[in-house]
Amino acid sequence: MYCSIFSRHGFSKLTFAALAWGLSAAAIAQVTENIDATIQSDLAGDLALASLVHDKDTLSLGFKSFDPNRYLPIDDDNIGSAESIQLQSELTTITLPYTWELSNEGLGFTPYLNGRLGLLERRNNVALFDDTNIPKDRRRISIYSGYFGGGGIWQVSDSWSIDASLGAFYQRYENVYRYGSDASEAFKPIIDGYIANFDLNVWQLNPAISAQYDFTWNDNLLQYRSRLSYNRGRSFDTDLDAHDFTINSASWRNSLFYFHPFGDVLGLPSTGIVGLSRIDLKGDVSRSLDTGAFYELHLDYRVDIKPYGFDLFDNLTFGLLINYGSSLKGASLTFSFND
């Protein structure tokens, strides 16, 4: 039984049996304290991950994941595995962003407000027993996120710009567990409301700063971006120690992109994009993704839809994303707005 969205820690039926029937009061207290700490760590990691997923001004949907090892002459577990592809197939991630640019008259920088709504969800089957004849249980973990903040962009030179922002997340965590057999339901009095079938609320503060360098020639663009983001938060309105936790997390993304114009498609400007990113992680999100750093390769095709007069959308992008070195390693076909 797990409460993490990545199911990195497990609690066997023997653990529950020991808690319920077999241990002294002192031993039960020690086991409970250890389990509480594990639950707190997993929950903090999941909520930190959700804020990282939504920490960009884009809506991204990976609608198909696959293992590059199957199609390329390589055999590298860091670029994909059956387990990571199965995990990605069980995940749903949606980010709905919107940015309001404000008047910069007399300020020397461009202020803006930014809002985002997001969902990170996993639906999967859980087997508590080795006996394959016992039906599996069904689990859904959903993290709903709302973000609002603001910042400013300073054009330092013709090529360099600085972006500083401060915002806050409100997040709602929901754990829904459906028992598939009488054998697993026997543990319901012990785990319901503790490891399964509970919800909680979380707030996070998110200061961030980034730098961007643009180099253009013959309508081509080479762009370097560096973004440092920090998250600090905690859960609230909870009655259990296991659900009372703090979040301390940081990420540093360094990216290099090449933009090549392809001309108009149906009267709309189009661009090919190749990008490589390294993301360094610290704190809770590092434990959640089981790594201190990972890489992303982007191969995208973007169409500018502003000529159509849409107020909410500037562009749409179709692409291939390859994740190397994290729990989400593998390749995904992506579709995004406002990238």
Image: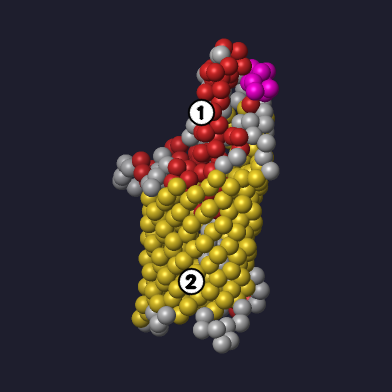
Which stretch appears magenta? 180-190
Report the front residue among 232 and 120. Answer: 232
Residue 129 at x, y percent in the picture: 55, 20
User: Residue at coordinates 42% horizontally, 70% vertically from top-left?
Assistant: 211
User: Residue at coordinates 67% horizontally, 36% vertically from top-left?
Assistant: 239
Q: Residue furthest top?
A: 22
Q: Say if residue 9 shows up in the picture.
A: yes
Residue 16 at x, y percent in the picture: 58, 20
Quadrant where the N terminus sits is top right
Report the front residue among 146 and 128. Answer: 146
Residue receiving disc 2: 163
Residue receiving disc 1: 34
Q: Main secondary structure of the magenta part?
A: helix
Q: Secondary structure at mark 1?
A: helix
Q: Secondary structure at mark 2?
A: strand
What's the residue type where badge 1 is placed?
Answer: Asn
Q: How many marks?
A: 2
What's the residue type where badge 2 is placed?
Answer: Asp
331 in relation to 277, above or below = above
Residue 304 at x, y percent in the picture: 55, 73
Q: Quadrant for residue 315, please give it.
A: bottom right
Distance (Cα) linking label 1 and label 2: 42 Å
Residue 92 at x, y percent in the picture: 58, 47
304 in relation to 171, above or below = below
Is 189 part of what is drawn in magenta? yes
| CB under 8 Å between discs 1 and 2 | no
